Amino acid sequence: MSQITPYDPPMDPLDILHEDGHVIAVNKPSGLLSVPGKGPDLADCLIKRVQAVFPDALLVHRLDRDTSGVIVFALNAHAQRSLSMQFEKRTTKKTYVALVEGRVAEKTGTVDFPLIVDWPNRPLQKVCHETGKPAATDWRVLKQTDELTRVRLSPKTGRSHQLRVHMLAIGHRILGDPLYAPETTDVYPRLLLHSEELRINHPESGKGLSFRAKAPF
């Protein structure tokens, strides 16, 4: 049975990867919500911490609480519109690193399974070929042993829990996942999924920008 761990966000100082008059990029720690949850106990979150330093910061996208890595915020309404449109039209390029169970047989592949919320067990998501929304993830093996594989994941869509459910669906759960691999959390105290690189076009100049943060595992 999956478990929701109590919210105990890390108190790491803000790790700013890039800042200019329009965009800031931050390296989010695992265990910190991107936006506030419901209730005062879930109020601490990345956007509030960012706004304490950059009061004009606006949300563009988010990462799951347990996922670490690169996330961008806009610093004005024009930048927010431009960046939101890039995410919507899928012109951004997102690259993640994960450590998964087992030895993945192929070297590269694509998971193309539609996803939908698993209502009786929400917030879990599930594969559903009848009612799910299209979701696709490219993957590539980076390193492996007989028990573990380090993979690079490139989502083509941005569904909730997409990478976690897609790896589960092909029999290689992401380790340390309190929702989809709860029994691995004793050995791996955090979800081993990290947003390593994000490429966008700058909302003002249109120039391509790439933000990177090395996986801490």
Image: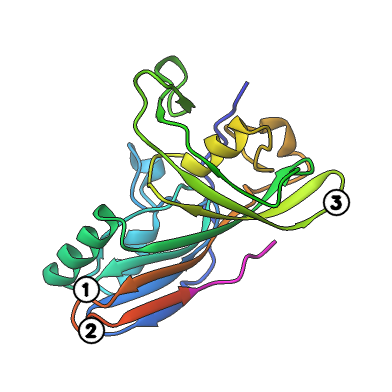
Query: Whole-Å distance between the Cαs marked 2 and 3?
Result: 45 Å
The segment highlighted magenta reads: 212-217
Task: Report whether residue 53 is seen.
Answer: no
State if disc 3 and disc 1 touch (CB < 8 Å).
no
How many residues crowd around disc 2 within 10 Å: few (fewer than 14), some, or many (20 or more)? few
Name the residue located 85 percent from the left edge and 51 percent from the top edge: 145
| Amino acid type, residue under disc 1 in the picture | Leu
Secondary element at image label 2: loop
Name the residue located 47 percent from the left edge and 39 percent from the top edge: 161
Name the residue located 69 percent from the left edge and 43 percent from the top edge: 175
Query: Whole-Å distance between the Cαs marked 1 and 3?
Result: 44 Å
- Residue 160 placed where, x, y %? 40, 39
156 lies left or right of 138: left
Whether 119 is drawn above or below 184: the answer is above
How many residues crowd around disc 1 within 10 Å: few (fewer than 14), some, or many (20 or more)? many
Secondary element at image label 3: loop
| Amino acid type, residue under disc 2 in the picture | Gly
69 lies left or right of 86: right
Which numbered disc, 2 or 3, marks the residue closer to the eye? 3
Of the two numbered discs 1 and 3 on the same chain, state the one appearing first in sequence: 1
Secondary element at image label 1: loop
44 lies left or right of 11: left
- Reading the image, the residue beneath label 3 is 145
Q: Does the magenta-highlighted stretch encompass residue 214?
A: yes
| Amino acid type, residue under disc 3 in the picture | Thr
- Reading the image, the residue beneath label 2 is 21
Q: Nearer the viewer, residue 83 or 72?
A: 83
Whether 36 is drawn above or below 53: the answer is above
- Residue 169 placed where, x, y %? 59, 30
- Reading the image, the residue beneath label 1 is 75
State if disc 1 and disc 2 touch (CB < 8 Å).
yes
186 lies left or right of 190: right
